[in-house]
Amino acid sequence: FSILLHHITTYHNIIIATTEAKMIRKRTQHAKKSSRMKSLNYNTRVYQQKRSKKHAVFFWCAFFVCCFQYAQWLSLPADVINTLDDELLSHVSNTVVFQQESAKKRMLPGNVNSTTKRDVTHMWDDEPFIHVINTRFMQHQGILTALAKARLHLFKTFTLPSILAQITQKFIWVIKVSPHLDEGIMTELIGLIQDGAKRSGKNEILERIYIVSSNENYNGNYGGWRGGEEIQEVLSHLNDTSNTTNSIDSRTSRGGIHTGNIDLLHRINALEPTKIMLQTRLDADDGLHQIYLQHIQKDALSRFGRNSAAAAASPTEPNTWFYWCSSSHIKWYLDGEGKQGGLDEEKKSEFCLTAALTLGFNIGTQLKDVPLYHHDRIFSELKPRNMVDCGAGPGVEQHCFVAISDFYGVIRSRTISSAGMRDVFIQKKEKKKAEKKLWEMVRADFNLSPESMTETKMHFTNNMKEIAKDNIKGQCSKGHSCKKKNKETLKLIMEK
């Protein structure tokens, strides 16, 4: 009732202000054309009389509308009124958001505000799916500071802006970092995300980004978001500071979960068995096309969604699981001709990239029911098999995966900070391919800044030996590449 009355009063004031402005403008124009003040005074009296009549009519109309609404409210059953009251009172949540940067100094991550203007805890209640992006940053390599700073530049230049630019924002982003990551780098990582969201006008995304001190990596291994194993692992760090020497963690009751809405995590944990589950892998030095996540979600609904128009029109049964990957991508090199680096494109007909590899589970499908493959084995393992394996029914001559090639789904940075060190140096024959249209594409479709690429290239150029030295130390650490050729290449860089 109070809210209704407030809106009526506001509308009333708008009418008064508009009417007065019109009359004053007319009176002023009339006064300029004529010096007869009597006419002006007469018009003023007429205006006041008209306004009084309008006020009276409006007041009685508003009064009767409010009485009618109040009578309807009183006629509701008591249990309905109590339910509505409870929903109104539950408006204040226990949400934790990023602390805004002050003019004097940035607050430490973990010293975050416990209130928010908008409750996103129930954002997934009416959605048919839950989409999680998994990123790892310096896992098992936290003490390699030079390498961490270099990768932070790549994260700032490629990964973060491409995520902020996604057409759909229906996802959560979990970034797992080494529990022993340098405190200054951790603070800078959180600051980059906070500042990026602020500049893009998407502050609400801060509640859906979780930076977690954890070396656990489920990519390519059994365990994941379907079944709740990974979300339980994330939540286990909420009050646990025993696995870290990072002083940031000991100063916050959030333990190893530095950012994000904790209530939303609990809600996802409860909803997960009743939703389509999508989990996408994204390395911290790669970026996504702005429509990539939306493309995956729409296709997932057509394959999984029992209530979608596409699924209803399909003669086959919905899939139980499915893979999506990108086979076309853009590569960015440090040693390009320009100060911004170099660009190249690559299309592979039968290959799935690691970046943006997505696995989807339909409702009722468990992790044990889905074959898990490394990205380079998806074609060889799944192409010979038809969709009967992923639940589409017999006689369907399609595969249980899609390699997206009709647009460049991913941009990958090729630098000496890469664990795999693949295609780090651009080949002479490929330089001509870095055309103007690619630069236009990375700006328009990936939301990337050439200026940021220039800064990143400069950082690598000025710290090449330190980065190479740290990457040698990081080779063969758990979860990372271990190739003799990589070490030899890095040693040559150090000797230059």
Image (cartoon, helix red, strand yellow):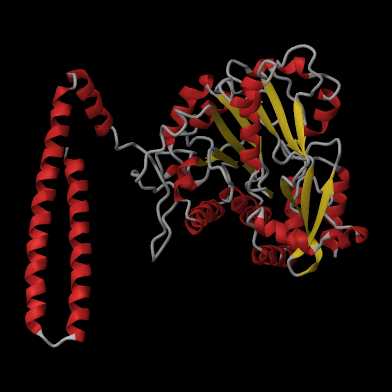
Q: Residue at x 17, y 83 (%)?
A: 31
- Across and down, in percent, residue 419 comes to 76, 46
Look at the image and tell me in which quarter the C terminus lies.
Answer: bottom right
- Across and down, in percent, residue 200 comes to 51, 56
Number of numbered discs visible in the structure rendering: 0
Question: Farthest residue in the top direction?
Answer: 394
- Across and down, in percent, residue 239 comes to 44, 33
Residue 217 showing in the rendered view: no
On the rendered structure, is 435 left or right of 31? right
**Location of residue 478 by image quarter:** top right
On the rendered structure, is 466 left or right of 106? right
Above or below: residue 75 compared with residue 327:
above
Question: Farthest residue in the bottom direction?
Answer: 35
Look at the image and tell me in which quarter the N terminus lies.
Answer: top left
Q: Residue at x 15, y 22 (%)?
A: 75
**Location of residue 42 by image quarter:** bottom left
On the rendered structure, is 388 left or right of 12? right
Above or below: residue 56 compared with residue 234:
below
- Across and down, in percent, residue 18 comes to 23, 63
In this view of the protein, which residue sits in the foreground, 412 or 489? 412
Q: Residue at x 40, y 52 (%)?
A: 99
Above or below: residue 68 compared with residue 9:
above
Q: Residue at x 47, y 56 (%)?
A: 198
Residue 16 showing in the rendered view: yes
